[in-house]
Amino acid sequence: MTEAEPDGWPGVVHREGRTLTHVSSMPDSKSKGPAAKSKDSVFHNPAMAGSRTRSVLLMTHVIESGMLGDSEIRALDGLSASGLRARRWLNELPPDCSSRLIATVGDMDQKALDWAMKTEADFPSINGELNSLLGDLRASVISQGWHWVDIDPFGSPVPFLDTAIQSLARRGVLEVSATDTAALTGSSKNPLMRRYGARVRLDKLKHDSGLRVLMATVARAAARHDRSIIPLLAIWDSHHLRVSVRVLRLMEGANNLESSLGWRVYNPTKEEVEASTNSGLLTKDSGTDLPIRCFLPLSHPVAREDKRVSGPMWIGPMGDKDVMASMTVGRSLELCGAIYSENDPVNWSQKNVELENRKVARAVRNIAEEAEAIEATHLVPVDELSSWLERGGPPSPARMAELLKKEGYASSVSHYAEPAFRSEAPWSEIVRVFDEISTTDI
Ligand SMILES: C[S@@+](CC[C@H](N)C(=O)[O-])C[C@H]1O[C@@H](n2cnc3c(N)ncnc32)[C@H](O)[C@@H]1O
C-alpha cells in the first residue's frame, strides 16, 4: 500500500463489532453524536455503530436470499469517512458472502480515503476486496454500476439520490441516512418543505412520519428514473433516520407509486376513518371508537392549513418481513460480536468484549420480533394511548402485543423511539385489550 500518511495517522486502534480500525481519537462510549468534525482529521461517529451493525446483517440476508443474483457484488460506501462501514462488510459478512464482495470507499476528502486504505493495509480483510473512489459522490457514483450504494451524509441525503439511483444495477439496494432530523420530524418546517416537499405534525409519531417522508422521497427519486422501491428496513436511531430499500428497474412499479403515498391524519373524523378503511389502510372495525390516527390515500383532499395532517408520505409497509426476521440477537452476535483473545491488539478484557456485544445486540433489539407486524396499520405509543383514552396508565407494549396476538392479530413490540406496539387489530380491540390490562394487571 502506498497511500500518503494522513494527518493524525495512526491515531488509536479501536474495535467496533468484530472489526479493528484506526480512529483519530478514542470515541467517547457515551457519545450520542458525532466526534468533532473539525478537530478530528478523519470523521468517525460512534453513534452510528448500530447502523453499521444492521448494515452487515442486512447485506448478509440480501446476498444469502439471492436478491442480488449469484455472482460478484459491487458495493459502494459512498460517503465513507474512515471506511469503517465497508470494512465491517468485508470483515463481518459470512465468508461465502464476503468472498463475492468488491467493496469501495468513496469520499471527496483524499485524507479520508488514505485513512481507510491504510487501515485496511494494517488489518486486511480475509475475503473480498477494498477499493477507493475519490470525488464528489453526486458525480463520482455514476463512474460505474453498483449493486449496493450507501449514502451517509452530514445532513440531508436529497442531493445524492438521483445519481445514486441511476448508478444502480437492474437489481440493487440503496441505504440512505439523514441527520437533518429537525427538518424530517417537523420542527424545522421550511427545510422540510424545501427538501422533502412535506409537512410533519410534531407529535408522538413524528419519527415514524419523518421516516415515511424520507421513504417517499427515495421512492419519488426512483420513479423519476423508471425504478420502483421495496422497503427493507426503516430505523430511527437517536440522531439519525435511515431507510434501506431494494431498487428495481420496473416501470410498472414506478407508475403505481401514487398508491403507496398518502397522508397521516391525527384525530380523524368518522368520514376520514371510513375513507381510510375503504382504501384498505385501516382494519375494518364494527366498534364506534375512532383511532388516534389513520392514513388517507394521496387522492383524498386535505386542506393545506389542516394542522392534523402530515405528508405526503409512504403509507405502505416500512420493512420486509424476512429481512427483519433475520435480524435476531443471535445472528448479530454470530456475525458481528467481538471475540475475546489473550493477545488482543486493543487489549480488551472479557468485560470490554461483553460491553461491545451488548451494543451489537442492542442494534437489533425488537427488530426480528417486529417482523410479523410490520405490515400492521397501527403503530401505537403506549403513553399516548392512555392519554387519548383518558383512563389508566400506559400499558406495557409487550403485554398489549401479547394479548392482541392471542386474539389472532399480528402484533408486536416496536423498535421505535417511544415505547410502542404495532398491531393489525381493529381499533376497538386495541381499546378493549387496554381496558382489560388496566383492570387486571394493576
Ligand atoms: C457523515 S460522514 C460519513 C460517515 C461514515 N459513513 C461512517 O459510517 O462513519 C460524511 C463524509 O462524507 C464526505 N463528503 C461530504 N460531502 C461529500 C460529497 N459531496 N462527495 C463525497 N464525499 C462527501 C465527508 O468528507 C465525510 O467524510
Image (tube, rainbow, N blue to C red):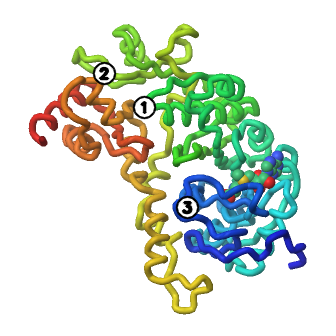
Residue 306: percent from left, percent from top: 51, 11
Residue drawn at x 75%, y 66% as measured from the top left: 102
Give the residue pinned by disc 2. 284
**Residue ID at (74%, 41%):** 165
Q: In the image, 309: left or right of 127?
A: left
Mark 3 or mark 2: name the one nearer the start of the chain: 3
Disc 3 marks a residue whose amino acid type is: Thr
Q: At which x and y percent is residue 402? A: 23, 45
If the image is split into quadrants, where does the C terminus sit?
top left
Pointer 3 residue: 53
- Judged from the image, the secondary structure of the residue bearing numbered disc 1 is loop
Residue that badge 1 annotates: 204
- Three-letter residue code for mark 1: Lys
Residue 285 picture quarter? top left
The residues bearing labels 1 and 3 have C-alpha atoms spaced at a distance of 27 Å
Label 3 CB sits under 8 Å from any ligand 1 atom:
no
| Res. 365 image quadrant | bottom left
Contact check, label 3 and label 2, Cβ < 8 Å: no
The tag earlier along the polypeptide, 1 or 3, is 3
Observer able to see residue 386: yes
Query: Mark 3 falls on what kind of element?
Result: helix
Of mark 1 and mark 2, the one earlier in the sequence is: 1
Let me know if residue 78 appears in the view: no
